[in-house]
Amino acid sequence: MRYAYFPGCCDHTSGREYDISTRALCHALDVELVEIPGWSCCGSTPGHSTSHLLGIALAARNLALVAEMGLDCTASCAACYQRLAMANVEMQNDPRLCEKINWITGKTYHGGVKVKSIVEIIAELNPEQIISRLVKPLENLKIAVYYGCLMVRPKAVQVDDPENPLVMDHLLEAVGAKTVDWGSKTECCGASLAISNDDVVLKLTSKILADAARAGADCIATGCPLCHFNLDMRQKKINQVFGTDYQLPVFYFTQLIGLAIGLTPDNLSFNTHFIDTSKVLELVG
Amino acid sequence: MSVAFNLTNSLKDNFGFINNVSKESGQPVEQCYQCGKCTAGCPVAFAMDYPPHRVLRMVQLGLKENVLRSQAIWLCAGCSTCTSRCPRNVDLAQVMDCLRSLAKREGVPLDDRARDVSLFYDCFLNTVEDNGKLYELGMMLNYNLKTRQLFKNANTGLAMLTRNKIKFLPAKTKNRRDVAMIFQRVRELEGKAR
C-alpha cells in the first residue's frame, strides 16, 4: 500500500512525535508513505478564517502536487487532513470555484485524489496485520481517547461520528488497551486561541483533563498536534492556574500502537514529551 | 445584555449585507429559527460578547457594523460543533469564516481579544507567504512584537528548545514563489491590500 504523505508544518517542531511515530508505524506495517515533493502549508485555521479563496488555494496547491504523483493522499495532522479534504470536496462540487482556484495556484486540479486521515489508513488495514505483530499488549493501560474537532467535523470530511467516535478506541483496544467512557472525546481544546487568548484555552483544556482523570485514565491518546500541544505542553500551566496536579501523559495513537508492536520508545519520540511518559512505560512493562 | 437597535434603518441600509453573507458563505442564514443549540454547545461562548445564535440573528437583521466589530466572530475557534448540531443545516462555522473575512476586507478596526486573534492569523500567514510553510519561531517573535509583549511565552520557548521542538531557521518549500503568488492573486481577486 502506497500513499502520498503530507507531513504538515509542525512535523519537525511542535508536532514532531506525530511525524516520527507515523513514519515508524507505517514502515513497520508495510504502508509506504511517499512525502509529497515541494509540499507547502495547508492554510490551516488562519487561511480559511480570513479568506475563503486563500484557504482553499493553499490546500489545493498540495492536491495538485498529489495528483501528479498518481497516488491517494494522507496527512497525520488532523488540521492538515481537514483542510486538504475540505478543499477537495469544495473543488469537486463547484466547477466555477475550481477554475478560480486553479488560476490562483497556477496549477490544474479538478479533483480525483482521495484524501484520508492517517487514522483511516491504519483502521482500514486488515486487523491481522497489526495483531500478528503484537509483542507488548497494552493490557494494563486505561486510555482516554481524544478526537478533538477536526477529524470528526464537519460532516463532509468526518472520519467518524462527531459526538461519539470510536475508530481510534477500536484500534487501541485491538492492541490490548482499555479505553474509558468519557464525555470530552470531541470537545474543542481551543486550538490556536492558545497564542492569542490563552486564558480561554486553559479553561477548555483543564476541563478535558478533569474529565479524563475522573474516568480513571492513565493517559490520553490523540490524533491532532494542536490538541497534543495544548494538553501536554500546557498541563503544567493548567495545574498552576487551577491548583490541580494532573500528570496525564498525552500520546499520539500512532505512538501507542507502535509501542504495542514492539517499536522502541526512542523511535517513537517518547522522550520529547512535556509530561513524563515513564509511568506509562512501566504500566506496559 | 440589553441593547437597543433601530431595525427599520438597519434592514433598509444593509439588505445587501444579508444577501452578501448568504451568498459568500453559501449558507441559508434565513433558515435559522433561533433554537440556541449552537450556543449551548459552543466551547467559547462564555468568552464572547454575542453568543453564536445572536451573531446569526444580527446577520438576519442586517446589523452589519455590530456584527463585523464583534469579538465573537474572532473568538470562534472553528470547531464546527454548532455546524454538526444545527437542526436547520446552517454551517455556522462557515458563516463565521465569512464574517471574519468581510471584516478584514473592509478594514474594520478591531480591539481586545479580536485584535489579538487577527494579529496572530496575520503573523502566521506572513511566514507562510515568505517561506511556503509556517515558521513557528518567526511567527511568535513577530506576534510578540506586534502585541508589545516581548517575552510572552518565553518559558514555553525555552522548554520547547530543550526538547528540540524549535527550529531557529525556517523550513522552506521548494518553489516557494508559487506560494507567494497564491497570496498575490488572492489579493488581486479580493481587491484589498492584506
Image (spheres, coloured by chain):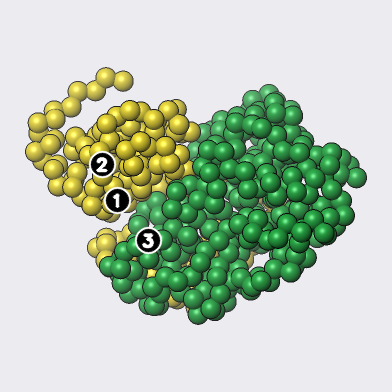
Chain colours: A green, B yellow
Image coords of residue B137 (percent x, y): 59, 57
Which residue is located at x 84 percent, y 42 percent?
A139
**Closest to the observer: B149 or A77?**
A77
The image quarter in which residue B171 lies: bottom right
Dot 3 corresponds to which residue?
A90
Disc 3 or disc 1, which is closer to the eye? 3
Question: Which image quadrant is residue A266 in?
Answer: bottom right
Give A101 or A195, whichever is nearer the viewer.
A101
Q: Chain of mark 2?
A: B
Q: Taking B185 as reference, is B18 above or below it?
A: above
Instruction: Tell which subunit mark 3 falls on.
Output: A
Residue B147 visible in image: no
Q: In the rendered view, does B175 fall on the left or right side of A268?
A: left
> Residue A35: horizontal and vertical position, in percent?
62, 72
**In the image, what residue type sits under mark 2?**
Val
| Circle 1/circle 2 CB separation < 8 Å | yes
Against A162, residue B167 (above or below) is below
Which residue position is annotated with label 2? B29
Q: Say which residue label 1 marks.
A: B25
Mark 3: amino acid: Glu
Residue drawn at 47 percent across, 43 percent down? B79
Task: Tell me the distance, in whole angstroms, between the alpha carbons under discs 1 and 2.
Answer: 9 Å
Q: How many residues crowd mark 1 within 10 Å: few (<14), some (14–19), many (20+)? A: many
